[in-house]
Image: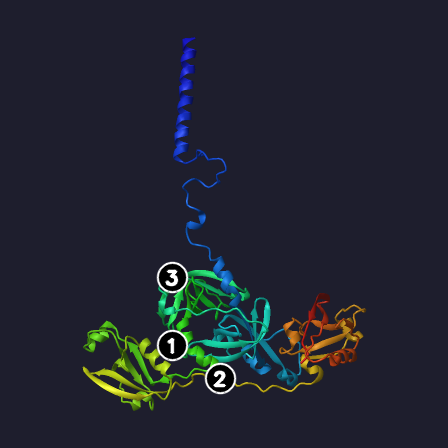
Amino acid sequence: MSGNLQRTTTTATLVFGAVIFGMVLSGGLDMVPRARSEGASDQLVGAAPVSAVGLPSLADLVERVAPAVVSIDASTFESAAERRRSQPFEFFRRPRNRDEEDDREFRRDSGGSGFLVSADGFVVTNNHVIRGAERLRVRVGGREYDAEVRGADGATDLALLKIEGGDEFAYLDLGDSDAMRPGDWVMAIGSPAGLDNTVTVGVISAKQRRIGISAETSSFENFIQTDAAINFGNSGGPLINLAGLVIGINTAINWGSENIGFAVPVNTLKTVLPQLRDVGRVRRGYLGMGVDDLTPEAAEAFGLDSTDGALVTSITEDTPAEKGGIKVGDIVVKIDGHEVVSIRSLIDYVSALGPDVEVEMEVVRRGETLEKRVMLAERPGDGEGEGDEREEEEESGIEWLGIRYQDLLPGPKSMHRIPDDVNGVWITDISPRSPLYDAGIRAENVVSVIVEVNGEEISSVEDLEQIVGGARSGSRLRLYVRRFGNGQELPPLFAFPAKP
């Protein structure tokens, strides 16, 4: 009996000890519920609110700036001969007469981003987004507008477009890129891969990057580097600071690395924007010499105490630098009394002056300081058009639709297994310039049949031409098109072209 009592007492002691140990352990792990006063919230006493922990939400900032960010569709047209040179292996194509083939045009579509800088519809983007394009469309807030190029500058890879709208547009204010520092938070907005209003966030990784995109931009590269994701289609979109101001124009990515993107500083835009708007191109001052920054080794070799200055590495024949007596090996230390800290400061100062301005340059040559007066010329190649504009062809009647057509006869119906009850006009060919092309209507590998116009059934070419010809100028037509391919009916399409 005493043995049983002893065992019971021992067991009770162990259980009691386990309970006490468990309470101590759970208290240490913060597992014991804490008392709350009646009506108190579920938040633990003394805990910091979620909104105060970590980074703040950028949703309000996105909501404020997104209406001024646009998507740009650029269309380029090329002849059959040009297309054959770029695509030498063309299979599965419908045979054509070579004369007919050479008359055909093909269309290449590309896209990018941009942002509005004024309420009256001026849009900033990259020059490479619109280079060579003959048709530009800008999407703003779900609406599309035709755009014209008001100015372009290949040297800074910037362009200015203009769109017309009945209402005032939302637009973005320009900040100060010089005031931004590595580590500052930034946000990129644009249309990568055609995904409008995509937002990415990161920091400024570095400034004043020269990455050698092209010979055209080499003298003016001064990029902001950021780890905010920039992808194809972001080009021309804004890089925004936390105040909602544009501090850069997203321009380039690094192929070999992740999270390395580059933007043109907005202060560069501010220097060229007036000329792009008022003149259409940028006229820059030009010396005609190659320069490089001074390294510590170069400064030591030239007997200088500082790396400030620009080392002249080449002189182009018959240019202002040669005429002004500048020589290879000279070190430019001042211009018009301004200290030349680097080649960036020299290039920016000379470019901003424009041509036909005389400058006074202080150079060090073999330890001697010399004064040289140089009359600037205009930098060659700046503002030149990217290609000759094509004369607009005069069109009349139904030709403005940009299609070839014929009655849908029993033979084609049978060949393409089109139901007997389908009547209309068969689109046998369509120009890439046609407004129907933008609606998705094609003639290659698809039989597209116009069966209704403005709600009226079409049974012949005569019906089509009568209704279209009778529509008033400026009105929108409603074309209903049924489509067939590979023996099956494809989803039909509506098209709403505006009659000129």
Residue at the image point whose x is 41% and y is 36% from the top? 30
Q: Is residue 329 left or right of residue 151?
A: left
Residue underneath mark 1? 220
State the image quarter where residue 104 is shown. bottom right
Residue underneath mark 2? 385
Tell whether label 3 touches label 1 (CB within 8 Å). Answer: no
Q: Is residue 357 left or right of residue 197?
A: left
How many residues crowd mark 1 within 10 Å: few (<14), some (14–19), many (20+)? some
Q: Answer with mark 2 or mark 1, whichever residue precedes in sequence.
A: 1
* Residue 75 pos. (x, y %): 57, 76
* Total tally of numbered discs in the picture: 3
* Residue 168 pos. (x, y %): 55, 71
* Residue 36 pos. (x, y %): 46, 35
Tell whether label 3 touches label 2 (CB within 8 Å). Answer: no
Three-letter code, disc 3? Asp
Secondary-structure class at tag 2 = loop
Camera-side residue: 308 or 260? Answer: 308
Residue underneath mark 3? 184
Three-letter code, disc 1? Phe
